[in-house]
Structures are given as C-alpha cells and as structure tokens.
Image (cartoon, helix red, strand yellow):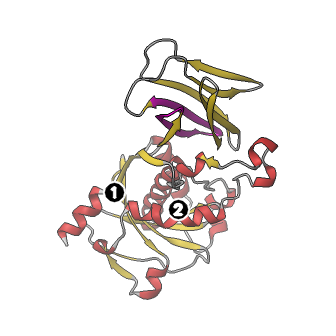
C-alpha cells in the first residue's frame, strides 16, 4: 500500500492557495448555519477553486461564474463541490485530509459527472491534487475507496483528452477557414494545452502553463527542427517559434517568415546562427503560418491558435 501511495504522491500536483481563494471560501461557507457545515463547505470550496485554477491553466474552459452556484439557497441539498468543464461535464471534488487512507464517495447527484477529483488540503496555504476516479467506478464498487485505488493526475489528462477532442466547440471547422488554409494540413495549437498532439509533432516539454512540441523538416537537402511553445493568457495565445539546424548551424541566407497583421515579418540568417526565435501574440482561433526558405526552395507549416 505504501509503495502505491508513494507513486501517487510523486505524480500529484501541489498548488498554493491564494488569499483570494480563502476569502471566497469563507464567504460561501458563512451561508451555512452549523459549524460542521461551515468547516466542510470551506475546505470543499478551497478544493474546487484550486482544481478549477489547475484545469484553466491546462486550457480547459470551466464555469464557476454562475451567480446561483455561490448562493446556498439555490443549491438546496448540494454544496457546490463540482468543477464544470464546459462541454464535457462535471468533476466532483473530494477533500482528503493528511494521514487519511480512505474516503466515502459522495452520492451520485450529477447526471453529467465525469468522475471524482481528490484534493488533499494540507493546510490553508497548500492543496495537492492527489488523484482521480472516473464516474463509472462508484457504480462498480462500494462507495468507500482506498487512496491506493486512485488513478494518478497523469491518468486524468489521458482520460479527458479524447473527450475534449470530440467535443471541442471552439475549434474552427474547415468551412470557417480562409481559402488559403482550407486545403492545408493544419495544426491546432490549443490542443497541445490539453495534451492532444498530432502524430508528426513530438512533445518536448509540458508544464502547467506551457506546451512545447517539435518537428523535423527537410528543405533544400538539409534537415531542420521547428519548435513551437504555446501558452494562454486570458484570451491571448502566446507562441514562440524556434527554428534550428538538426545537426549544424543555420545556413547563411536562410529566412524564417510569419504573417504580421497585414504584412510579413522575416528573420534572415546573415551570419553564423544556431537558431531563429520569433515570439507571436495571437487571438484564439487566429490562423498563421511559419515559412522556411532557402533561395527558391521553401516549406510552410499552417497553424490555428
């Protein structure tokens, strides 16, 4: 049991609990009458706010803004323990206390429940996303589960990825693309933030805010590596394009170009250079391309932010 729990903790996600979360949890908990209910709702709300922040950092759309959600009179018998992943369903948050080895799952009250997210509240300053169970688990077993039965936080991303891919509502369909893009192979960068990758792009780095992938391209008899790093800041998609030689410096005269509003921005290798790096700031759904050119030979990769 200890070994399984150690592995689970190695893959867990620890996050700070900001003062604003504690203040919001106190305000919501104060709507309940008994001290037991207030304490329970306080920690549940912290778990929801931390879990919600984590999924937003991964690029998932969530919905905590409904006014009725934070009004106990509208909630009746439930206590707002769920995170809504827009277009996918709900994750019910279950609070784990230090030294706790098992937990009784909440009654299944949500028709669109995806599963359970287990959040360990170590103190008022730190929360740890410990693991996950799909909704089907509660139907197949008793309601009490051991922490060693939990799936890891890596597993939840693998579980959600195909659901996200099949239900994304904000990915631009082919009919909505400009004529230049309509017949091209397009890479959707926001998929990377949800750990969904095309076969020809190799993930090279992933953290809570940024996804980086790379791809080898052949041009004029030489092999180059194109690397894109993607992150999201509110409604802005931040992209950094890096082009480098697979085994040598970039050739003199090589150009890397990207569209810049109504113009084209080009970086040219005029001296010995190991790489070219171009930062971009794009809107959700914005089309762009990256062109590599050596003399009359060129290749373009097409993207949607």
| Vertical arrangement, residue 283 with respect to residue 57, above or below | above
Decide: few, some or many residues near mark 1? Use Cα within 10 Å; few <14, some 14-19, many ≥20. Answer: some
Q: Which residue is drawn at 45% across and 29% down?
A: 244
Please tell me in which quadrant of the rendered image residue 232 appears. top right
Magenta region, mostly helix, strand or loop?
A: strand
Check disc 2 and report the residue beneath it.
Answer: 161
For residue 33: magenta? no
Q: Nearer the viewer, residue 249 or 174?
A: 249
Check disc 1 and report the residue beneath it.
Answer: 12
Query: Residue 124 location, x and y as percent?
Result: 37, 49
Q: Nearer the viewer, residue 202 or 255?
A: 255
Work out which quarter of the rendered image holds the C terminus and state it: top right
Q: Give the range drawn in magenta.
A: 220-244
Query: Residue 77 location, x and y as percent?
Result: 58, 75
| Mark 1 and mark 2: Cα distance apart in space | 18 Å
Query: Residue 135 location, x and y as percent?
Result: 49, 77
State the residue lying farthest toward the left: 2
Work out which quarter of the rendered image holds the N terminus and state it: bottom left
* Res 305 visible: no
Disc 1 element: loop
Disc 2 element: helix
Which numbered tag is attached to residue 96? Answer: none
Q: Which residue is drawn at 45% across and 58% down?
A: 47
Q: Which residue is drawn at 49% across and 37% down?
A: 227
Query: Residue 85 location, x and y as percent?
Result: 59, 61
Q: Which of 237 and 213 is in front in this view?
A: 213
């Amino acid at each position: 049991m200890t070994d399984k729990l150690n592995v689970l903790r190695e893959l867990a996600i620890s996050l700070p609990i900001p003062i604003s979360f504690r203040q919001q949890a106190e305000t919501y908990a104060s709507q309940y009458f008994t001290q037991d209910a207030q304490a329970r709702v306080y920690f549940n709300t912290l778990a929801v706010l931390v879990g919600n922040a984590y999924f937003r950092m991964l690029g998932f759309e969530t919905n905590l803004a409904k006014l009725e959600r934070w009004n106990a009179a509208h909630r009746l018998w439930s206590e707002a323990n769920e995170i809504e992943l827009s277009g996918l369903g709900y994750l019910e948050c279950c609070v784990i206390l230090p030294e706790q080895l098992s937990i009784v799952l909440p009654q299944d009250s949500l028709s669109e429940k995806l599963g359970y997210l287990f959040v360990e509240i170590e103190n008022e300053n730190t929360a740890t996303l410990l693991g996950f169970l799909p909704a089907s688990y509660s139907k197949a077993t008793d309601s009490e589960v051991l922490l060693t039965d939990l799936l890891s936080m890596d597993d939840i991303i693998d579980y959600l990825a195909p659901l996200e891919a099949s239900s994304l509502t904000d990915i631009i369909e082919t009919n909505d693309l400009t004529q230049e893009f309509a017949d091209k192979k397009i890479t959707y960068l926001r998929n990377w933030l949800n750990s969904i990758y095309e076969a020809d792009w190799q993930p090279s780095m992933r953290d809570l805010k940024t996804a980086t992938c790379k791809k080898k391209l052949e041009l004029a008899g030489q092999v180059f590596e194109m690397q894109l790093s993607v992150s999201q800041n509110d409604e802005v998609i931040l992209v950094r394009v890096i082009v480098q030689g697979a085994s040598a410096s970039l050739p003199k005269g090589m150009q890397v170009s990207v569209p810049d509003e109504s113009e084209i921005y080009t970086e040219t290798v005029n001296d010995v250079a190991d790489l070219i790096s171009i930062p971009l700031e794009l809107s959700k759904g914005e089309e762009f391309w990256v062109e590599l050119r050596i003399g009359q030979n060129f290749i373009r990769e097409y993207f949607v932010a």
